């Protein structure tokens, strides 16, 4: 693996792109201080430049060199970093991070991933790494090497680190004086945040918000039509099931978690969507998923995947 990390370092230092695993999903990474690398990420991913990229750091010291951190941010950091928390922070004027990654504003999404390969790469280079999820814009995120599209694989150096651990992206948060705003639901749940900040108001941005452009409807989309909260499966549909019930598909089905475990379901979600999307059928029907904890994040992804 050390050899691959060295190759990744060289690739990034040349301004080229590396795909690497994190604990959430695979990231499509480039030097965050190199505006050409940033442009290449947007181009390769076919992502509108108005939708900002997350900046990844190896440790808190490097974040503090570039950003201002308030008291609530500090509390969240103490509890959730390294891990699937992305904080929107205000950039210091001295920072060399390219303004191209945050649509020319000084507010940047930052996180320290909790994954050995990601951290080894981040430690090897002398700059933060900008990395959106490694998928073409609006398509299903990648939690395994074989989910990556050929186009992405052809144009990058890829490190295959097996399946990611959590399977859902980070929770994106912006803090204010007296409230926090969840811009994207993710692997850290509202319940977990409430435990840390019991007195603070938590608002969840809805899908129509322009605050976080990546949160707009239509995202995470399979090629097949997707129908959620299904309580009957049509003749030509495949099934993404959850828990024990009487639902059945004549063609193909996967169960996110037979025991109804939302953590297990999160880990399986994108993998099973990728698999079902390859079936010959009229569409994917998805069983109802409980709307609490990680179920809220799963439902957020499914609602957007089903949006026309
Ligand atoms: O788990 C993750 O977050 C993965 C791994 C690779 O770190 N990354 C990821 O990045 O999911 P991406 O680009 O696919 O999603 C980032 C989300 C988008 O919804 C984007 O709009 C929002 O975070 N975001 C990033 N920077 C922002 C900013 N400065 N202000 C508002 N929203 C921001
Ligand atoms: Mg994404």
Image (cartoon, helix red, strand yellow):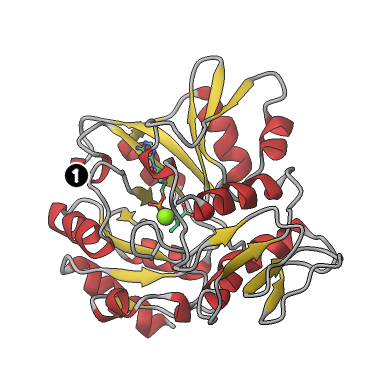
Residue 50's x, y, as percent? Answer: 25, 41
Quadrant of the image where one finds ligand 2: bottom left
Residue 58's x, y, as percent? Answer: 42, 55
Quadrant of the rendering where the N terminus is positioned: bottom left
Extreme top residue here?
178
Q: Quadrant of residue 244?
A: bottom right
Neighbours of disc 1 within 10 Å: few (<14), some (14-19), many (20+): many
Say above or below: 77 vs 220. Answer: above
Residue annotated with mark 1: 100
Say above or below: 282 vs 263. Answer: below
State left or right for residue 66 relative to residue 197.
left
State left or right for residue 222 relative to residue 232.
left
Q: Nearer the viewer, residue 39 or 307?
A: 307
Q: Quadrant of residue 133?
A: bottom left
Q: Nearer the viewer, residue 7 or 26?
A: 26
Secondary element at image label 1: helix
> Is residue 158 in view from this perspective?
yes
Say above or below: 222 vs 205. Answer: below
Q: Quadrant of residue 52?
A: top left
Q: Nearer the viewer, residue 69 or 190?
A: 190
Residue 108's x, y, as percent? Answer: 34, 38
Question: Which residue appears at 86% of the width and 67% of the height?
Answer: 246
Q: Nearer the viewer, residue 242 or 267?
A: 242
State left or right for residue 14 relative to residue 86.
left
Residue 223's x, y, as percent? Answer: 44, 68
Question: Which residue appears at 36% of the width and 71% of the height?
Answer: 19
Question: Which residue appears at 46% of the width and 38% of the height?
Answer: 87
């Amino acid at each position: 693996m050390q050899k691959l990390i060295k190759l990744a370092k060289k690739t990034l230092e040349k301004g080229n792109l590396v795909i690497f695993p994190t604990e959430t999903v695979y990231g499509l990474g480039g030097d965050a201080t190199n505006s050409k690398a940033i442009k290449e990420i947007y181009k390769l991913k076919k992502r509108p430049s108005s939708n900002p990229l997350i900046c990844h750091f190896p440790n808190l010291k490097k974040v503090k060199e570039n950003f201002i951190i308030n008291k609530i941010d500090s509390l969240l950091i103490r509890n959730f970093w390294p891990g699937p928390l992305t904080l929107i922070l205000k950039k210091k004027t001295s920072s060399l991070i390219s303004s191209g990654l945050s649509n020319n504003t000084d507010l940047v999404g930052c996180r320290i991933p909790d994954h050995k390969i990601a951290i080894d790469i981040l430690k090897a280079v002398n700059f933060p790494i900008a990395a959106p999820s490694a998928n073409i814009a609006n398509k299903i995120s990648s939690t395994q090497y074989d989910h990556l599209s050929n186009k992405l694989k052809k144009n990058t150096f890829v490190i295959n680190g097996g399946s990611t651990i959590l399977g859902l992206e980070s929770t994106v948060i912006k803090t204010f004086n007296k409230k926090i705003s969840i811009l994207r639901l993710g692997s850290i749940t509202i319940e977990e945040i409430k435990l840390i900040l019991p007195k603070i108001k938590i608002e969840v941005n809805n899908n129509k918000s322009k605050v976080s452009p990546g949160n707009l409807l239509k995202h995470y989309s399979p090629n097949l039509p997707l129908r959620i909260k299904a309580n009957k499966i049509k003749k030509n549909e495949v099934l993404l099931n959850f828990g024990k019930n009487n639902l059945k598909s004549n063609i193909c089905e996967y169960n996110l978690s037979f025991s109804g475990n939302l953590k297990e379901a999160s880990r399986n979600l994108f993998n099973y969507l990728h698999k079902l999307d390859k079936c010959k059928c009229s569409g994917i029907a998805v069983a109802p998923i409980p709307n609490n904890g990680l179920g809220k994040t799963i439902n957020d992804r499914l609602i957007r995947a089903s949006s026309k």
